[in-house]
Each structure stands twice: as C-alpha cells, then as structure tokens.
Image: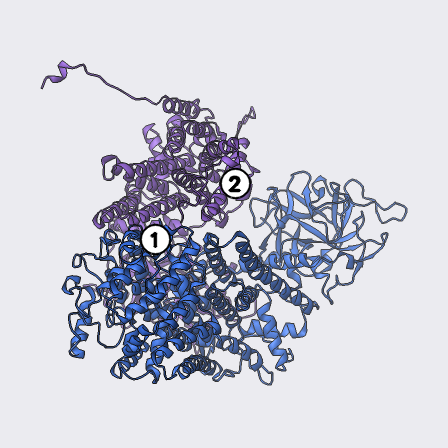
Chain colours: A blue, B purple
C-alpha cells in the first residue's frame, strides 16, 4: 500500500512535471531517491528542466563530491566496502543536515530563485513529523486501556512480586538478572506503590493498590520499539517506505501490543535490544567521521543498551553476539584499509573495547551491586544460596552471628551441601522401610533449619566426651578420621554395601549404633578441598568431603526427592565415583563449642566478586532446572513463527476479562513470506555477483542495501531464534518476540524489492534474480566499452516508478501512458537487441558503464588513455569535476598508473556520455566517480 | 594383432614402499594376538548383544547410533560363523568356544590398521612432504589409545576409518578437479567421499559432524567455482549438480539402505518390541504379530478390543479396569466417586478387553453384516469382564485433580447419572467418514457431556490402585498430544450374548491368520524417531569423564581385568602425542591468525600456494578436531575418553603439518635473518 501511494505521488509529480518541487510529493520523492541510490539516473524525472540547469552549473555538485572525497578511500576494503561507504556516509541529525545541504545545493542550482530554503525546511519537518506520527501512534496503542484488566495477568504475579521485594528490600531469587525487576520496582516506588500487595496468583484483583506505575513503565518502554525499528530500518535501507512498513507492522501487531502492556520483563528487554540495534546502526553510519562526538555518543549508547539487555534477561546475550559480530567485521575492514595507520586502527579497537566491553561490564556489575545493596533483608531466596552468602542478609540467623571459627572435636555442627537447593545433612527417628537397603535410621538432606540437622563431631576411636574440661581442645584437621554422631538420636553416620534407595549405583547411608557405639562402617575421613593455609577446618569457608573409610565412597546427595516414607526430603548417598561435584562437597554452617571463643562472622563475609559469581551460578542452575516435565504441553520453537499457539494471559472462566497473547496473523505470515523471499533473492544476488554478472548500477546499489542492511536484520532474527532450538529448558511463546521484531524489520525491506525494478511484478525478487543471472558472459565483455547487444537477456533499468518520458523502450517518447505501462511490463526480460544503441531514448551507455564490472577492470586502462585521459598524473583537463577526483585518487596511490587505472571507469563513461550532454549522465558521474567499482585489482 | 609378440612385454609397477611398510606395521600392531583376552572386554558386552540379535535375526533398538556400525560388527560374526549363542551379561566373562573372537574383532582391527596408511596419504594429498606424511602415519601407528580401541569389538576405529576415508577421498577429488574434472577418477573420488560420509554417519551419529565439515569445505570450493569466470554457466551447473548428487543424494540413499538392510535382516520380534507401535510390532514375525494376525481389520459395533496408549510413557500400557473401586476418601482428604477404577496397565491381561457398544442398542455382539464404527460416531466402551461402561464426570481425578476422574460406572442409585457416551475421533484419518481400523487407526475418545478427552496422565496410582497408571479425562485439551491417543491392538468380533460365555471368550486366545505389513518408509521413520528420542536415564559411570579432561588426559577407562593374574587393559592415551597435538593446534591457530592479520595489511609472508595449502590443511585437520570435539560440550549424555579419539586423529594429522611448516618457512627465514625475509609480495599485489 505504501508502495502504491509512493508511486501515485510520483505519478502526480510526473504529470505536473515542469513545476518546481513545491508539493509534498515531488520533494519527498526526490530526496528519497537521492538518499537511496546516488547513482540512479533519475533526477530528470523530478525536474528535467532543473537537470539541464545542473549541467550548466557544476560547482554545487562538485562540492558534494569533494566532501565525500574525504571519506576513507576504499582501496583495500574490497568490493563491498567500496560500494558501501558512500551509502553509509550519513549519520543522525548531522547526516540529515548534510543530506539537506546536498538537496539544498541542488535545489538552488535547479531554481535560482531560492526555493532551497523552504524545501530543506520542509524536508526536515516532514521527516520529524513522520517520526512523531509513528511514535504517537505507538504510544497511543500501547497506553490505550492500560489499566484493564485490573487484576494480575500471567507472569505479573512473579515480576510484580519481585518489584515489591525491591520496595520491601527483602532478598529473593530469580533466574533472570536484576535490572528489569529493579526498574519495575523503581517505577512502582515512584508511582506510590507501597509493596504491600501480595501478587499471589493470576486473577487476583489489585483493588486499591497502585499498579499503573509499573504497567506504565513497561508500556512506555514497549512503545519505543516502534520508533526504534522505524529509525533502524530507515537508516539501513534509506527508504522511507521500508521504515514506514516496519513501523506499521509493529504498531498493528497484536502480540507486540499485548506483551507491552503488562508488568513483564519482555518490553524492557526488547527496548534495550532495539536500542542497541538502533545505536549500532547509527554508529555504523557514522563510519566516515570516526571519533566525532556523535560517533562516541552512539558507540557508548550501544554499550549502555547492551548492558541493559543483558541486565534484564540472559537473552540479551544474543544481541551482544550480534553487535560483537558486527564490530569484528567492522574492525576487519578498518584493519584492511591500508590508508589507516596501525595506530589509528589501534585507537578504533580501543574505543570499541572501552565502549562495548568495559562499559557494559561495568554497568552490568553496577546493577548487581545495587541489587545486593537494596536487598539487604533476609527473604524467601535465602535457601538457594550458600552459608557465606546468607551471612550478609539481615534477619538471617547467620547475620552478625558469632561462632567459633575452627572446628574442634566435640563441636556441634550443621553441615550444608554446597550444591544449590540441597540443604543440610539431616536424620530423624524413622527407619528405611522394608526392602530398601538395611532397615536402619534414615539420613536425608533437608532445606530448612531444624534440630535434627545437628551433628556432633567425634574422634573415631574414643567415645569419651571431648567437652570434658579436663581434655585440651583438639582441632579437627584435614585428613582426620572422624565419626559424626547425630545429636538428637545418638546414632552415627554410617554407610555400607547396600544400594541407595533411589540411585542404585550408590551406597546407602544410614544412622547406626546405640548411643554413639557403632562399628567401623561409621568412620569417615574428613578432607578439605580448598585448603590454602593450615589444616584446620574453618566454619563456612572450608569445603569438605567426607570419605567413607571402609568402602572408599564419598558422602553426597543425589538431589532426588525421596518418596513419602522419607518425608519427601532429599536422598543422601555414598557415591563410589570420586568426582569433584558440588553434590559431594559440604561446608559447616552452625558451630557450637563452649570451649572455643566465638568470633564475629563479619570477617567471613564474602567479597563482592564472590557473591556476584555465586548468584550467577545459582541463576544458571535455576535456568537449567526449568525443565519441562513429561506429559506437559510445552511450546516448541517451530510453533512460534507460524503463530501456531498463543499464550493465555488472563481469564480462566468465561466471565473474566480475557487476555490472550497471539500475533497478528497477517503480520506474522507476511514476515514468514518475506524471510523466504529475502533468502531467495539474497542468494540469487550473491550468486550473480560471484559469477561476475554485470548488473546496472542501480541494481547493484539495491543489492548492496539488501545484502548489507537486510543481512544485518536477518542475522538478528537468526540469532534471536535458532538458539532456542538447542535449549533444554521450558520455552514459551513470548520468547519469540525479540526475533519477531527483527523479522518485521526484514519485512520492511520487501518494498525495496517491489518498488523499483519490477514494478507490478509480484515475484519481484525472482525477476530481479533472473535478470541478474541471465547474462552469462558478462565477464568476457567486462573491459569492452560496447558489449555486443542482443546476446543475452538483460534486466532493463525500468522507470523507477511513475510514468515519465525518456525511458520508454523504443525510439521516441511515449505516446500514451498505456503503452508505457505495457512496455514496462514486457521489458523485464526482453533481449537488448531490440533497442538500438544510439536511439535517443535508449540508455545503452549506462549498460556499458554502470554494470558491475569488477573482474574486468584490469583490462580497462588502455581506453581511458586513448579517449579520455591524457597520459599524466591525472585525468587532467577533462571537465572540472573529474580533475579533482583524479587528484584525490593519486594522492592515495602514488603511481600514476594506479590513478589511471582507478579513474578508468568513470572516464570511459564520461567519454561516451559526456558528449551527448545527457543530464542524468552528469548525475551518475557525480555520484560515482569517487568510488568506481574497480578500485581493486585482483 | 600379434604385435605384442614383437615387442617385449614390460610391466612397470610403482610401489610406494613407505605405504607398504606402513600398512604392514599397521596390520601387525592391530592384528597381533587379536584374540588375547578371550573374555568380554568393556563395551563388547554391549555390542555383543546386538551381534547376537543380528545372528538370530531378532529385532532390537539401540539409541546409540544408526545400524551400520552394528552391522559391520555383525558381518565379522557372520563371516566367522557365529550362531549368536552367548550370554553377554558381564565384563570379563570368558568366551565360550562357539564365539569366533578373532573374526568378531577383525573388522575394527582392519579399520584401525588401514587408518595408518590413510593418514600418510592425507598429508601427501595436502601437499606436504613425504617426511611429514610418514610422521603422521607413525604417530597414528604408535598411539596406544587408538591401538587399544581398534583391537576390540568397538566402533570408534570404524568411525575413524570412515572419517579419514572421507577426508582422503575429498582431497583426491579436489586435486583431480584441477587437472581433469569429470574424469573417471574424479567421479570415483567424489562418489567415495559421499559414501564414506554416509558410512561414518551410519556408524555413529558423531559422523554427522565430519559430514558437515566436508559439506562446508565442498561448499566453499564450489563457491570459488561459481566465481571462476573461465567456466561457462552450463559447466558450473554441471559441477554443482555432480557435487549435489554425490554429497547429498548418495549419502541419503545409503543411509536409507542401511536401515533397509537392518529391517530386512531383523524380522523376528524381540525384547525391544514394546517400545515400538503396535503396527510396527505386527510387522515383525512372532510377538504381537502372532496375536494380531488374522484379526478383523475394521472395528464394528460389538467388537472386543484392547486399547493401547500411543504415548507409551513411562511404560507402554493398555486401558484397563478391574473390580476394585476408587477409595471413598483419598489420603489428602479429597473425596472420590467410589466407582470402579479405570487404569492403564503395562501387562497383557484379560481385564484389558473392552467392547465397543452402540448406545442405541443393547446387544454386545456383532451383527451380521458387521456395522463398522466411523470417525465421529458415538460409542460406549463396555468393560468385558465386569460389563460396566467407561464413564467420566466432574469429579477430580485421584492424582491430577485438575482433570476429571474416569471410572466404570456403578449405579449406586444416587443422583449421579451415567455419563458414558464417547465420540470417536480418528486422528490420522484421511477422510471424515473413515472406518476405525485395528492397529492402524489412532483414535481419541471425546466425552460427549463434558468434552473431556480420555488421557493417560503418566502418574502412578498409590497402593489402592496397585501402582497402575492413572487415566483421566482432560478437560482443556490443548491441541494434539500422544497421551490422549489410543489404538486398537487386539481385536475380534464378539459373538457371545451371555456374560459367562463372553468371559470364556475373552480368556481364549484370538485366532491366527495372514499378516499385514507396514511400508518401509513408515517403519524407517518410526524406528529413526524412536532412536532419536529414546533416552536412557542412567547417566553415571565410574569412568565417565568430561570433555575438558580429555585434552589433558586426566582420565582413563579400565577395560578389563584378568580374574587371577591381575593383567589389565586400560584405555590410556600417549601423553607425548596428546600434548604435542594440542600444542600443534595452538601453534597453528596463532600462526594462522598472525598470517591472516598480516595479509590483511598486505604483508604476504607466504607465497599464495603455500598459504592455500596451509589454510586447507588447517580447515580439514583443525576443523576436523573442532567438529569432533566441541559438540560434546553441549551433550548431556554420559561421556567417555574414547569419544575423543576421532578428534585426536585429526590433531595427529595436524602435528607434522605444523612441524613441516615451521621448518620450511619460519626456520629458513630465521636462518636468513629477518631482513632477507621474502619481501617481494609486499605492496605488489593487494586485496
């Protein structure tokens, strides 16, 4: 639709041709053209009259060239770069200003009366107005009826609750990094929510609690997705219609809309992902002015957004990966640019390291610092963390506790497993049931604190009471052989050659003996794994293993839940496999020994890096633990792009306010289609380029936009989608949404396929591709200024849009619209033979010069010498424009031969076209001379 | 015609004595005293079972890999005349006299022996010197882990053989490409590449990664070919087509062929039948086929059927009911309907029989002619032994309270009417009027009153339910799931009017007749799918190790222990080779990076052809190491040291390559001094 309207406008412009660009249509149109394909010879279509004027007043155009000429010359960068640089050459407001100046200059040339000022202002204004419109629409849709339903929807129960935890400053555990929830908490705090709502289960009414602040934050961040996508696509494709299409897709996608309206992490995550993408694209387009303030700004903004994305969910890693790949490619080009010294390259590397690695890491760490600082009270998350970690939390019994530091015989201790969420070594007055090992007392692990967790550490060979004051204090040392007596039941920790209740390959662990008298199966050797100084065993900090003396197995917990006879506590086994897993490592937590002095545990508090590391371990463990159970209906990644099944957000009964997360099928299936279309056309273009097919410059330009811009977006989609196939954890539909943003942006590129070269042909990409593939022997004619026409099918450079003179196939101007239309439809694959070179309207010269002539450049030098360029250091006295370029070339390449070589293509063009005085030839030369395709020799 | 009589007949043979000597030494090291531990060593206990199954033609299912590897081992047994009669029950058991140990171990040993000369040839084909090639082969020869692994009835040696064969034949093909494309040897090596790749995949799934590597390398070369503008379009197309056929089509066909042979050879039913679907089982001789043969195809009103859950998790089971009722009050205080229990029972039992009844009629026998049941028909399911009908109602199920309880209805004369109408949905129907077929149709039962679906919840009932599996009515059935799908396994037309006669009939076996067969593709896809999804949960082993321990050789595996003399076999790497291999890899990476960066700055340290050789050697050997090693970090199964051996062989190939490169380019340059370093490329050719 947008395509069509664009064409309409253009058609209008064509009908009112001689008028100066006053109306919105033409101005927009011209600017857009100019932005996309500088080399596209269509200026006359806007205003042929003005075009002729251009020819007479060269200087403004020349200025433009000189400015561009300062960009890093594309000597070593290869083909892609040389093509790309000119197009990247703008960034942000400055870029638009530059563009504006450009346009203004041309407009001035066109119309000496001074219409330029108004046109330029109009340019800028319309650009901003469109952006404002897009943003406004986005905000309006996201904030519309934000307060409904007034009850908890889906995961609001988690993230709202976690927001409350921040307000109440109680510690909790979640599998995601804290930034998203911190922002939610902050929004709640600022909007007057007091953290008292329980967020128990979906469907609970909010009643008087203020929840709009939290939802408002999510909706606010979610609303930015649309303008971000708009700007990104605009920058990548330089096409307004592409950007508008993307914005429209995202604005009207129900899934995106729904996901942005509730207290969830996804809008926050997507906000940061899109911000990172946008700023990356922006800083890429600043490539011609490195180290400018703007460049630094976008680069560091990229870093900040990356930190934000990672700080919300680990899915942020994918965008980090994308930015990383982009940066590596970028540096690779810079490194290959021989005009840059190594010092400059080093500066580039350092800048990126600083902004994309150091800065995000610092910010990410800072969010954790704030997280730990804010959450200072003991809360529901304590049990997941180690003893040392818990000592930090006020309200926890380890907080500010003072206990003896080193373990001695006779101490009463609790022993905690180092693996997360296993708990304390535990026993109780119940026996293993009949048929499960020996009928002795059960030994389990238990997550809660309890008297049955207390054990007394004793020497293996004496049963005397070590607490007797007559005995000296004897510390337990690494390698000692000990006995652990359960305090409540006075039975010893015991193991023997019976299989464990659940893990058949391990041995059973029981409580055995009467009043501490057992047998030799009660002896354990205590070993400290992380001993650095001394052999004593430190409370909290020493990681110990208990090795059974007789069987040689290691005390551990399998983490499996015992059946009801075991009170659903966890199984304890003695494993014969001497592996260093956390499951078989323990530490001493509580420690009571009246003979030893208590010291304050504050000295044992872990350092910040340690708790950072630990919380990450716990998060990863938690993420891996989210495994789907058997029989559970889980969402599969292949369900997502086809919109197979949504996600119920709210409403169990028929009467409730129901919310269902489901993408807009039109949008989603269009996205699917465009991915297929893109892959098809992209591969065809790539093959054609590899075959050395000569294509018209405009197609080459389009291909570059498609391959580079579209490629980036496609990469984003793949990075945000395919890794989910490898994940073992539970997946939900909403995991697809970051990828969906990218795929919508890719769809935005599809108008590029249909707008220009095959107007009205639905399988545009195919046509484009076929046209590219068809000329087989392009390479053989590469150096030939006059390829024999008619030997091959050739994609005609068709009128870009609208109707106008000058491009009708066949001699003479078109007689009627109808005929042109037919010709346009027919012309796609028509053999060139029918159009005789030399006829007034047939553009055979661009066919000779604008083709993609990369491999053949070598053969060129002779011709320019003969016809265009007199032998000498430059193209010399050719029309003024060229001279300047020749000089700029020769300043890069010291040898004259080089400069001739480089200047050749445009010289040839000039030779063959200049004489005729075609206005559009001028445009072509202007845009392309500084960067002819053949800047490299292979 | 008689011209050859006039001239002397001369036969000139070029024999590469290097190659002969290496082959000889390889054979010697691998075949010497091959039968020595005449006892089951380590995983022989595992592969041996499958060899026995092959010998006895009994169907089995092994999730560890496709069947080609097992078939290779079984071929040894076949050649040695093994009858399959040996109980593979423990490591260390003495082989009885009927086990041809030598021929069973022969093929892996041969594969291991031939790897030695192949290493030599690969390095040669990479355009490195004979000296380097001999070095590579010698390293392969003396690596004790490789020797150990190839002298036993294990698959790694075979996998390594095919990996190396794929690399070698691709290199030969690639070198042919320059001189004589589309010649006979060109075709031969190209095809052999495809064949070797597919054999590698057929031995173990790990082979897929080598196959991928070959595909990527071939794709890159093909991409260069596309860019070669001296070739016409047609010729390029022919090149691409030839590669596609040889590297994509042939492997796929061969892979199918392995399965075809597998399924043709194994036609008898065996211990793994239960995992497969009823239809698959019915295609095997004996087992289920014996029961299901000749039963009527179309289920009619009055048919007696057993219903098997398609899901089969945690165990395959049949819809079942028995006299006992649900307890009035469960342990947690919830109440039940106190009606007759309906469960899923993993064993064959007379209580698994159900009668399909037309709700509008009373009789439980098949009318003549039989009226077939179609998709969408309303049926009642009457339990054969108790004559009560399957019922569900709005009562919470015992273990899954969010679902409805399913029971057999007992009329207690309270205000709880029977809700025993079910609508039949055939899931895999082709048309909406399709008839319900024995074994072939997968059906769902949708309750008419509540639209709940009959489902196997997977939970075990407590003692009152005899630990059988729970059946529930799923109210909110979200889409298709196997746990709601059932199929008829045993089936006969009921003929007895009286309950007593019917009980007698149910207890009697079903009649026997001709068999029905599944198509090969259906069997293949089912078997392949089951192999991929089957997970053995036992994930701990005394000698299991993590990938990181392999590189540093921090682990070993005890393979065998002599019961009396304490003689032992251990799988243990040669530490010198392992360390130097890792070093070579690291040096390669560093040098490669260094050259790459320098080239980017237009400093060409190496001549172009040497650079290309260097890159190709690295991408094949280093890449081979990476693709055979790195994926293990993502795997969750139990890993052992021997998983590293394929990666190790590639590392061994890289070692002499790096050494030669250092001596050729770096040392020479060092001798000449840095000033004299070849400078000509600088600044001349760019880009």
Host chain of mark 2: B
Badge 2 crowding class, 10 Å Cα cut-off, few under 14, some 14 to 19, many 20 or more, is: few
**Marks 1/2: CA distance?**
42 Å
Question: Which residue is disc 2 drawn over?
Answer: B586
In the foreground, B478 or A582 = A582
Find residue B407 and report its image quarter. Answer: bottom left
Q: In the displayed structure, does residue B579 sit left or right of residue A413? A: left
Q: Are marks 1 and 2 in contact (CB under 8 Å)?
A: no
- The secondary structure type at the circle numbered 1 is helix
- The secondary structure type at the circle numbered 2 is helix
x, y (%) of residue A484? 74, 47
In the foreground, A284 or A232 = A284
**Which image quadrant: the N terminus of chain A?**
bottom left
Of tags 1 and 2, the one toward the viewer is 1
x, y (%) of residue A402? 81, 59
Q: Could one spot residue A727 in this view of the protein?
A: no
Q: In the displayed structure, does residue B306 sit left or right of residue A394? A: left
The residue that appears at 38% across and 64% down in the rendered structure is A710
Q: Could one spot residue B45 in this view of the protein?
A: yes
Q: Is residue B653 above or below residue A767?
A: above
x, y (%) of residue B263? 30, 44
- Checking the image for residue A509, the label placed there is none
Question: Which residue is disc 1 drawn over?
Answer: A901
Host chain of mark 1: A
Q: Is residue A791 above or below residue A762?
A: above
x, y (%) of residue A314? 53, 62
Badge 1 crowding class, 10 Å Cα cut-off, few under 14, some 14 to 19, many 20 or more, is: many
């Amino acid at each position: 639709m947008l395509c069509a309207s664009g064409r309409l406008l253009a058609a209008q412009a064509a009908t009112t041709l001689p008028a100066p660009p006053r109306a919105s249509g033409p101005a927009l149109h011209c600017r857009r053209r100019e932005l996309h394909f500088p080399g596209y010879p269509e200026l006359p279509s806007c205003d042929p009259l003005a075009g002729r004027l251009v020819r007479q007043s060269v200087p403004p155009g020349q200025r433009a060239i000189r400015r561009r000429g300062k960009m890093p010359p594309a000597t070593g960068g290869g083909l892609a770069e040389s093509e790309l640089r000119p197009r990247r050459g703008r960034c942000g407001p400055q870029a638009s200003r530059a563009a504006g100046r450009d346009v203004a200059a041309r407009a001035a040339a066109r119309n000496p009366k001074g219409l330029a000022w108004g046109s330029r202002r109009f340019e800028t204004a319309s650009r901003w107005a469109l952006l404002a419109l897009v943003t406004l629409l986005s905000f309006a849709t996201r904030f519309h009826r934000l307060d409904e339903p007034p009850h908890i929807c889906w995961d609001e129960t988690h993230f709202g609750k976690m927001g409350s935890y921040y307000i109440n400053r109680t510690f909790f555990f979640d599998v995601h990094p804290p930034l998203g929830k911190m922002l939610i908490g902050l929004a709640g705090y600022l909007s007057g929510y007091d953290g008292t709502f329980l967020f128990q289960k979906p469907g609970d009414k909010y009643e008087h609690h203020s929840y709009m602040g939290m939802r408002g934050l999510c909706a606010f961040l979610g609303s930015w997705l649309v303008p971000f996508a708009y700007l990104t696509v605009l920058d990548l494709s330089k096409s307004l219609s592409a950007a508008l299409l993307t914005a429209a897709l995202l604005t009207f996608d129900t899934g995106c809309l729904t996901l942005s309206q509730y207290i969830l992490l996804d809008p926050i995550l997507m906000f940061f992902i899109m911000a990172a993408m946008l700023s990356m694209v922006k800083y890429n387009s600043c490539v011609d002015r490195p180290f400018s303030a703007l460049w630094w700004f976008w680069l560091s903004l990229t870093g900040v957004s990356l930190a934000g994305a990672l700080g919300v969910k680990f899915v942020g890693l994918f965008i980090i990966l994308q930015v990383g790949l982009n940066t590596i490619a970028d540096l690779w080009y810079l490194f290959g640019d021989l005009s840059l010294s190594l010092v400059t390259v080093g500066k580039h590397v350092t800048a990126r390291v600083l902004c994309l690695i150091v800065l995000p890491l610092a910010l990410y760490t800072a969010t954790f610092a704030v997280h730990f600082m804010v959450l200072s009270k003991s809360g529901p998350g304590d049990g997941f963390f180690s003893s040392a970690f818990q000592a930090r939390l006020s309200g926890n019994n380890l907080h500010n506790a003072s206990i003896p530091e080193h373990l001695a015989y006779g101490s009463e201790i609790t022993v905690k497993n180092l693996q997360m969420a296993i708990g304390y070594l535990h026993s109780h007055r119940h026996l293993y049931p009949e048929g499960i090992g020996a009928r002795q007392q059960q030994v389990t692990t238990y997550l809660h604190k309890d008297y049955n967790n207390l054990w007394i550490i004793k020497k293996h060979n004496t049963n005397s009471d070590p607490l007797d004051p007559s005995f000296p204090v004897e510390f337990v040392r690494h390698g000692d052989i000990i006995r652990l007596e359960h305090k409540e039941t006075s039975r010893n920790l015991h193991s023997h050659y019976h299989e464990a209740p659940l893990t058949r390959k391990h041995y059973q662990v029981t409580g055995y003996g009467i009043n501490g008298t057992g047998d030799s199966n009660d002896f354990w050797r205590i070993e400290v794994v992380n001993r650095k100084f001394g052999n004593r065993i430190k409370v909290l900090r020493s990681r110990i293993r208990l090795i059974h003396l007789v069987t040689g197995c290691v005390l551990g917990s399998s983490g499996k839940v015992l059946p009801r006879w075991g009170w659903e506590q966890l199984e304890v086994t003695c494993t014969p496999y001497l592996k260093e897993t956390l499951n078989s490592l323990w530490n001493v937590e509580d420690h009571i020994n009246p003979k030893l002095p208590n010291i304050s545990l504050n000295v044992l508090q872990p350092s910040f890096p340690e708790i950072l590391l630990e919380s990450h371990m716990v998060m990863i463990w938690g993420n891996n633990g989210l495994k789907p159970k058997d029989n559970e209906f889980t969402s599969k990644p292949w369900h997502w792009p086809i919109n197979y099944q949504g996600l119920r957000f709210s409403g169990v009964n028929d009467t409730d306010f129901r919310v269902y997360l489901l993408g807009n099928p039109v949008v989603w299936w269009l996205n699917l289609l465009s991915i297929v279309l893109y892959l098809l056309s992209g591969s065809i273009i790539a093959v054609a380029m590899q075959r050395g097919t000569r294509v018209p410059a405009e197609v080459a330009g389009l291909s570059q936009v498609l391959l580079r811009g579209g490629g980036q977006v496609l990469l984003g989609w793949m990075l945000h989608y395919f890794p989910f196939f490898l994940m073992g954890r539970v997946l939900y539909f909403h995991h697809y949404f970051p990828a969906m943003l990218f795929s919508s942006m890719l769809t935005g590129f599809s108008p590029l396929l249909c707008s220009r070269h095959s107007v009205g042909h639905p399988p545009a990409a195919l046509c484009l591709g076929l046209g590219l593939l068809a000329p087989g022997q392009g390479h053989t004619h590469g150096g030939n200024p006059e390829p024999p026409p008619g030997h091959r099918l050739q994609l005609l450079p068709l009128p870009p849009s609208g109707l106008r003179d000058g491009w009708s196939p066949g001699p003479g101007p078109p007689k009627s619209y109808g005929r042109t239309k037919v010709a346009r439809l027919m012309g796609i694959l028509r053999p060139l033979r029918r159009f005789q070179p030399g006829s007034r309207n047939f553009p055979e010269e661009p066919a000779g010069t604008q083709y993609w002539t990369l491999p053949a450049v070598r053969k060129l030098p002779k011709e320019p010498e003969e016809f265009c360029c007199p032998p000498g250091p430059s193209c010399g006295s050719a029309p003024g424009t060229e001279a300047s370029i020749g000089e700029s070339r020769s300043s890069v390449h010291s040898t004259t031969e080089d400069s001739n070589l480089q200047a050749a293509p445009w010289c040839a063009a000039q030779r063959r076209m200049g004489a005729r005085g075609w206005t559009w030839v001028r445009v072509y030369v202007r845009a392309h001379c500084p960067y002819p395709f053949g800047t490299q020799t292979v | 015609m008689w011209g050859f009589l006039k001239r002397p007949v001369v036969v000139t043979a070029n024999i590469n004595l290097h190659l002969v000597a290496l082959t000889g030494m390889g054979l010697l090291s691998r075949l010497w005293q091959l039968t020595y531990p005449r006892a089951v060593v380590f995983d022989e206990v595992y592969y041996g079972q499958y060899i026995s199954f092959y010998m006895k033609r009994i169907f089995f299912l092994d999730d560890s890999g496709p069947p080609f590897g097992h078939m290779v081992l079984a071929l040894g047994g076949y050649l040695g005349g093994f009858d399959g009669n040996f109980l593979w029950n423990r490591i260390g058991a003495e082989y009885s006299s009927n086990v041809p140990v030598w021929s069973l171990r022969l093929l892996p040993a041969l594969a291991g022996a031939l790897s030695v000369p192949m290493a030599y040839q690969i390095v040669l084909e990479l355009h490195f010197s004979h000296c380097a090639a001999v070095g590579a082969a010698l390293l392969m020869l003396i690596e004790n882990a490789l020797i150990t692994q190839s002298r036993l009835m294990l698959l790694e040696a075979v996998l390594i053989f095919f990996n190396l064969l794929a690399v070698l034949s691709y290199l030969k093909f690639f070198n042919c490409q320059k001189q004589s494309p589309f010649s006979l040897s060109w075709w031969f090596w190209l095809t052999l590449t495809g064949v070797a790749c597919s054999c590698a995949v057929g031995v173990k799934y790990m082979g897929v990664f080598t196959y991928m590597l070959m595909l990527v390398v071939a794709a890159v070369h093909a991409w260069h070919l596309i860019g070669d503008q001296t070739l016409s379009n047609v010729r390029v197309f022919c090149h691409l087509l030839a590669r596609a056929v040889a590297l994509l089509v042939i492997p796929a066909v061969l892979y199918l062929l392995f399965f075809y042979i597998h399924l043709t050879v194994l036609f008898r039913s065996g211990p793994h039948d239960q995992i497969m679907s009823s239809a698959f089982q019915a295609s095997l001789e004996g087992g289920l086929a014996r029961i299901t043969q000749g039963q009527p195809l179309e289920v009619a009103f009055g048919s007696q059927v057993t219903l098997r859950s398609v899901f089969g998790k945690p165990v395959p089971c049949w819809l079942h009911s028995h006299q006992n009722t649900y307890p009035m009050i469960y342990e947690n205080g919830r109440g039940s309907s106190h009606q007759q229990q309906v469960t899923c029972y993993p064993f064959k039992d007379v209580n698994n029989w159900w009668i399909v009844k037309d709700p509008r009629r009373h009789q439980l026998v098949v009318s003549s002619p039989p009226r077939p049941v179609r998709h969408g028909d309303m049926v009642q399911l009457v339990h054969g032994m108790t004559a009560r009908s399957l019922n569900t109602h709005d009562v919470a199920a015992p273990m899954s309270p969010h679902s409805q309880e399913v029971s057999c209805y007992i009329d207690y004369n309270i205000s709880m009417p029977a809700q025993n109408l079910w609508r039949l949905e055939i899931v895999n129907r082709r048309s909406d009027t399709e008839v319900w077929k024995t074994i072939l149709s997968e059906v769902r039962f949708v309750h008419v009153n509540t639209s709940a679906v009959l489902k196997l919840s997977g939970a075990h009932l407590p003692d009152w339910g005899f630990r059988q599996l729970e059946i529930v009515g799923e109210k909110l059935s979200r889409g298709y799931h196997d746990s709601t799908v059932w199929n008829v396994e045993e089936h006969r037309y009921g003929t007895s009017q009286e309950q007593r006669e019917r009980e007698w009939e149910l207890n009697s076996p079903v009649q026997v007749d001709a068999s029905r067969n599944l198509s090969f593709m259906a069997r293949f896809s089912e078997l392949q799918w089951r192999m991929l999804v089957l997970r053995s949960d036992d994930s701990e082993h005394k000698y299991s190790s993590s990938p990181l321990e392999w590189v540093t050789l921090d682990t070993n595996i005890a393979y065998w222990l002599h019961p009396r003399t304490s003689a032992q076999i251990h799988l243990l790497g040669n530490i010198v080779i392992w360390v130097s291999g890792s070093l070579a890899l690291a040096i390669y990476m560093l040098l490669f990076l260094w050259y790459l960066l320098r080239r980017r700055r237009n400093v060409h340290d190496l001549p172009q052809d040497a650079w290309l050789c260097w890159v190709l050697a690295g991408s094949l050997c280093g890449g081979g190491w990476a693709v055979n090693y790195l994926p293990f970090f993502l795997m969750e199964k139990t890993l052992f040291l021997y998983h590293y051996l394929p990666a190790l062989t590639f590392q061994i190939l890289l070692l002499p390559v790096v050494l030669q490169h250092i001596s050729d380019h770096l040392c020479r340059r060092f001798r000449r001094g840095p000033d004299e370093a070849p400078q000509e490329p600088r600044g001349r050719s760019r880009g």
